[in-house]
Amino acid sequence: MGALLEVENLTVWLATRRGPQKAVDGVSFHVGVGEIFGIAGESGSGKTMTAMALLGLLPHAARTSGRAVFDGRDLLAMSARQLRAVRGRHIAMVSQDPSTSLHPMLSVETQLTEHMRHHLGVGRSEARGRAIDLLATVRIPDPERALSAHPAQFSGGMRQRIAIAVALACQPRLLLADEPTTALDVTVQAGILRLLDRLRREQDLAVVVITHDLGVMSAVTDRICVMYGGRLAEVGLRQDVLNQPRHPYTRGLLDALPHPEGGAAALRPIPGSPPPLGRVPEGCPFHPRCAFALPSCRTDRPEPVLVGDAHASACPPDPLGGAA
Ligand SMILES: Nc1ncnc2c1ncn2[C@@H]1O[C@H](COP(=O)(O)OP(=O)(O)OP(=O)(O)O)[C@@H](O)[C@H]1O
Ligand SMILES: [Mg+2]
């Protein structure tokens, strides 16, 4: 089956006082129909800008290059008008903060039905019926009563479910979920992830889940990529990347995860911090923090190369020697 989304060499320059700076630098990945693809990486690695570029929602004066072919059409080459027709209808987004996805002053019914009526041309009562179904799909208790409520009347987890229902209102084929669970406690997180998994199975929805948390990744994703300094460090099947990481950065992220039995002592954070915009080092962007860096890592720009079946790493020498 062909990919639903094929991102090729995506580069994003953001306008800064020091001129245009790369927030995303030559990133390529694909997402299949009904697949859950994860984008992981520390803060500032370019995850959100990657998603925003796909939807044409980048900050003012940003520029892009590369291609992002969705269902046969290049999103990066579309006019603002063409993108508006795709956004919400074929590709929807849920952000980390439900307050940005939901309007505080509008009822849940208005927010659920507005896009349906606009994009799908359905009448008021049909839209209302669909809205009730959607709220039931995301497991909001008493959907009929919920319709007349406002977002503030719900808990954080419920608001995030409503935001997902709004995103799904026009039956998009792709959902971009940017940190959909970060603000939520662990039990609620698990519920949201199960929901995404169910939607993919029942509706063939493809999902891109963005998170800095590899633990979240391991719960639902089919394949994942790890970004650092706007670049792709590693990409592959979830079990390959998480069980046999090839890039020292991926390994570092995994070592930094709290161990279920280990308490805080098991945490081994990666020393240093990720580079800010415009300060990404030459060569391998991770080299200043990497215990395995060679002199060439300071100068040679590594591109991801295949290290296994559909598993690519920008650090092919396997400095970890495969050691667990
Ligand atoms: N509006 C903006 N103007 C200038 N720089 C920005 C803007 N938004 C993001 N950046 C910078 O672009 C880089 C990539 O940011 P991005 O938001 O994509 O990171 P992220 O991986 O989503 O991080 P986080 O995990 O914190 O959400 C960062 O260095 C960030 O500071
Ligand atoms: Mg982000």
Image (cartoon, rainbow, N blue to C red):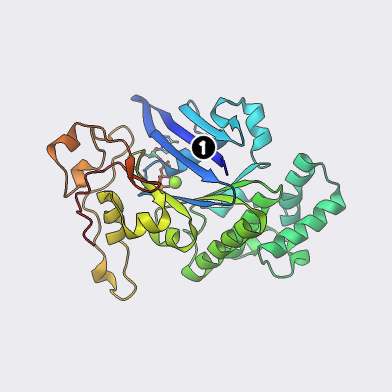
Q: Quick one: SS at disc 1?
A: strand
Q: Residue at x 19, y 31 (%)?
A: 299
Q: Residue at x 31, y 70 (%)?
A: 259
Residue 294 appears in the rendering: yes
**Residue 269, how many percent across, how many down?**
25, 58
Left or right of 232, for residue 128: right
Q: Residue at x 66, y 42 (%)?
A: 88
**Residue at the farthest bottom position:** 261
From the image, which quarter does the N terminus lie in? top right
Left or right of 115, for residue 63: left
**Residue 102, how many percent across, how many down?**
63, 51
Could you say which quadrant of the image residue 274 lies in?
Answer: top left
Residue 105 appears in the rendering: no
Q: Residue at x 59, y 65 (%)?
A: 155
Q: Name the residue tied to disc 1.
A: 6
Q: Amino acid at mark 1?
A: Glu
From the image, which quarter does the C terminus lie in? bottom left
Front residue of 23/202: it is: 202
**Residue 77, how many percent across, how many down?**
56, 25
Q: Answer yes or no: disc 1 within 8 Å of ligand 1.
A: no
**Residue at the farthest left position:** 295
Front residue of 219/103: it is: 219
Q: Quadrant of ligand 1?
A: top left
**Residue 79, how many percent across, how many down?**
62, 25
Q: Is residue 91 above or below residue 20?
A: below
